[in-house]
Amino acid sequence: MSHTSILPPLQGARIHLVGAKGTGMAAFAEILKAQGAILSGSDVADVFYTDAILAGLGVDMRVGFSASNLPEQLDLVIHSAAYAPDRNPELLEAARRSIPVMSYPEALGALSVKYDSSGIAGVHGKTTTTAMAGCLMAGLGLPATILAGSAVAGFGGRSTKILGDRFFVAETCEYRRHFLNFHPRRIVLTSVESDHQDYYPRYEDILAAFIEYGLLLPRGGELIYCADDAGACEAASAICERRPDISLVPYGKKASGPFKVEYYRTGNGKAVFRLSAFADEFALRVPGEHLALDATAAIALSCSILESWRDERPGAAATGVDGLSAGSAGLRPGDAEKLREALLAFSGSKRRSEILGEAGGVIFMDDYGHHPTAIRDTIQGIKAFWPERRLVVDFMSHTYSRTKALFEEFSACLDEADIVILHRIYASAREAADPALDGKKLYDAVAAHRAAKGSRADTALYFENPDEAREPVLGLLREGDLFLTMGAGDNWKLGVWLLGRKGQGEGGKA
């Protein structure tokens, strides 16, 4: 195979995308298309929201994978990391024809070389932080291209926002050290915890990967990190010890400096918080104190990029302070208000506290949270945002390795839900099933933990498959409830089905 780490000139380049329907791949296709590439692609027959995006881009899509899918004239093949070069027939054909090949993480890294790039990383929060940063940069009018790991309402339902070609902001993934392909000028580090146990068996392994990523920063680069997250602080300290030339920018309640969160509170369908450097509050219409931290990270990154952009243009330096406290260098009159307006307009991203709709007096939400910390924080945030609603959480655990490694944490993270529904473990293609563990064992542990906390036995339910829960859950939902599907599995389909049936006026108790 003619493996490469350099993108060809994109204007007129013929590029084939293997696994084009993936969120990252489809988002990358938008960037390639905007720069003049001619695209073809292939993927499975299943329909995803990205099908419409690829069709709108004019990507010549083929169903399934076959050597015959590769066009005769081709400059590059980019493949999803889910497909192995030594097994996928299209990648094998590319090797036979000596066509240059890159994985998606490699292509993302190669693209980052062309920009002043910022990578957003962390076990939790990176997608929402990236989405918020894109919306803030649009509000500030910054010439940036933003790539998030999920569809974002503020991006027109896509994962990419193209505002210009001076700066690049991308969600960067820690799995299999994919983010080490990226070339960052700035890194936002939201959190470091044990995760992806199939690749990082110990916490020290994943911590080392994040430290290695931080050390990629150039001299004078910035590490914007969450001071409220112990792992992020540990990584930042280790990076600074080896690279004192890197600038550390903390944010959060425990931070010092301009991005210290002085308070957070909810009320009237909004969450408000105050940052040290700003005279007025910021407000969000999405629930959870953890989302206020993500917003703070996005504000810090946006301010850094804005200052850099103005430094590049003669005569464009900050001329005063309006709505800002002292020490907020690089910001002009009106900037704070633009940030506030953009943040208030933020309505979330797909599968991140996403409101699917309301029917029969029940709010239906979906969230991708699949790590105990993210699950706990999301539930707490929703309970604080809608304290009067009964919260019914349907959770499907993802991967045997994660469930086994964090079993005790999973047993306890659902405590604050009023009713909990669990299912089988959603297996990953990258690991074998564990005969010593199944969804019923996790359910038993969750039920026992809830009982010890005083919850009634009938507030924890188990259905092997989400489809089996349809009619029973339809019957238990009542006006005033909030039904939340959580996890990286396919139980989100249950929420969609229930919303449809409730919309028809079916089921429920008075």
Image: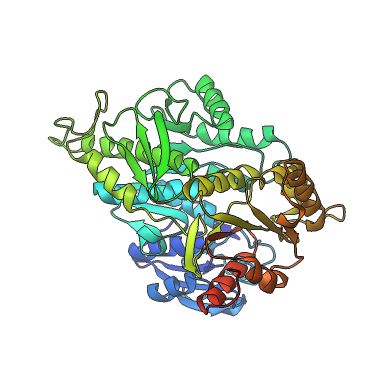
Residue nearest the viewer, comparing 447 with 178: 447
Q: Is residue 403 above or below residue 282?
A: below
Which quarter of the picture shows residue 45? bottom right
Residue 262 locus on image (x, y percent): 39, 28
Q: Is residue 261 above or below residue 477?
A: above
* The furthest residue to the front: 510
Between 251 and 507, which is closer to the camera in this rendering? 507
Give the colour scheme shown. Answer: rainbow
Q: Quadrant of the C terminus?
A: bottom right
Q: Is residue 81 visible?
A: yes
Q: Residue at coordinates 21% horizontally, 37% vertically from top-left?
A: 310
Figure quadrant of residue 261: top left
Question: How many numbered callouts?
Answer: 0
Residue 161: x %, y % from top left: 35, 57
Quarter of the image where the N terminus is located = bottom right
Where does the image place residue 129, in percent across and percent down from the top left? 44, 46
x and y, in percent, of residue 451 in the image = 76, 46
Question: In this rendering, would 273 be left or right of 357?
Answer: left
Residue 171 appears in view: no
